[in-house]
Amino acid sequence: MAQAKKNDASQLVKYAIDLLVHGTAQDWKSHYRLREFQDVMAEKAKDAILLDFEYKDRRKLYRCVNQRFVGNRPVDYLEFGVAGGESFRAWLELNANADSRFFGFDSFQGLPEDWGADNPKGTFSRQGRVPEFGDGRARIVDGLFQETVDAFSRSFTPRNALVLHMDADLYSSTLYCLMQMQRHIAPGTIILFDEFTARDCTDEYAALQDFCQACCRDYAVLAARRDYVKLAVEITR
């Protein structure tokens, strides 16, 4: 047993030295965020509902959140990263309350910057084509987040339970939207993330952590896919 622990410690030291000597900035960032993520989820997800579903079945998470935590109350639903409108349309159907309001934000020109080697700038572009929803409760805000969200947030007055859906993928976009919505986020606000652990937790997860640290916020995980790629949190402070 003692020898095994010694070998484990030796391997850890070797890994640390290799990271120090050969690691890139992204390697360091990933290592830090993954270690942090493990500690954070052990505490914040201890009472979470864990679900099993494939990406195409993410409506299972939305249904759970709407039924268990929203309770079909009217919502002010804001989605950052609409793309083709699949998740936006799902929420329109799941929450049929006539008093609910739905706001979708997107430039429909794809990612504004590279998101790793496999997703260069422009990925997910719809060439500016805005999806149609045929629901009078829906409003689309067309443009880059940095050009639209600040003005919207300043003029916006919540009427209902606030539900934010962060599907911006990038750290920069996710953090920007959270910071601009800070004035409206309060205990009880529900925030969904679609790619929470992407790129070794250096994008949406990192953005939520940095937002909470900067704004003295805290959260608990309400429900998640078992690997935490997709999840819903509730702001508790």
Image (cartoon, grey):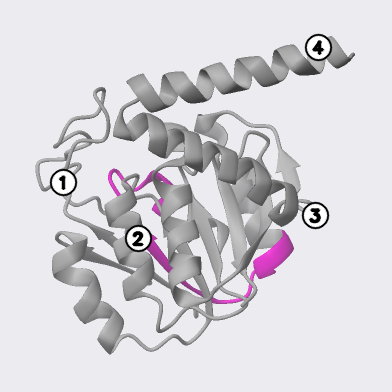
SS at circle 1: loop
* Cα distance between the residues tagged 2 and 4: 42 Å
Q: Residues within 10 Å of mark 2 (few under 14, many from 20)?
A: many
Q: Kindly tell me whether residue 184 is visible in this rendering.
A: yes
- Indicate which label's residue lies in the foreground, 4 or 1: 4
Amino acid marked by disc 1: Pro
**Span colored in magenta:** 68-88
Residue 88: give x, y in percent of width and height.
Answer: 40, 54
- Indicate which label's residue lies in the foreground, 2 or 3: 2
Amino acid marked by disc 3: Asp
- Which residue is located at x 50 percent, y 31 percent? 56
Judging by the rendered image, the residue that carries numbered circle 3 is 47
SS at circle 4: helix
Q: Earlier in the sequence, mark 2 or mark 1?
A: 1
- Indicate which label's residue lies in the foreground, 2 or 1: 2
Judging by the rendered image, the residue that carries numbered circle 4 is 4
Q: Which mark is residue 112?
A: 1
Q: Earlier in the sequence, mark 1 or mark 3?
A: 3
Q: Residue 21 is drawn in which quadrant?
A: top left
Residue 116: give x, y in percent of width and height.
Answer: 27, 30
- Which residue is located at x 18 percent, y 52 percent? 130
SS at circle 3: loop
Q: Earlier in the sequence, mark 4 or mark 1?
A: 4
Judging by the rendered image, the residue that carries numbered circle 2 is 175
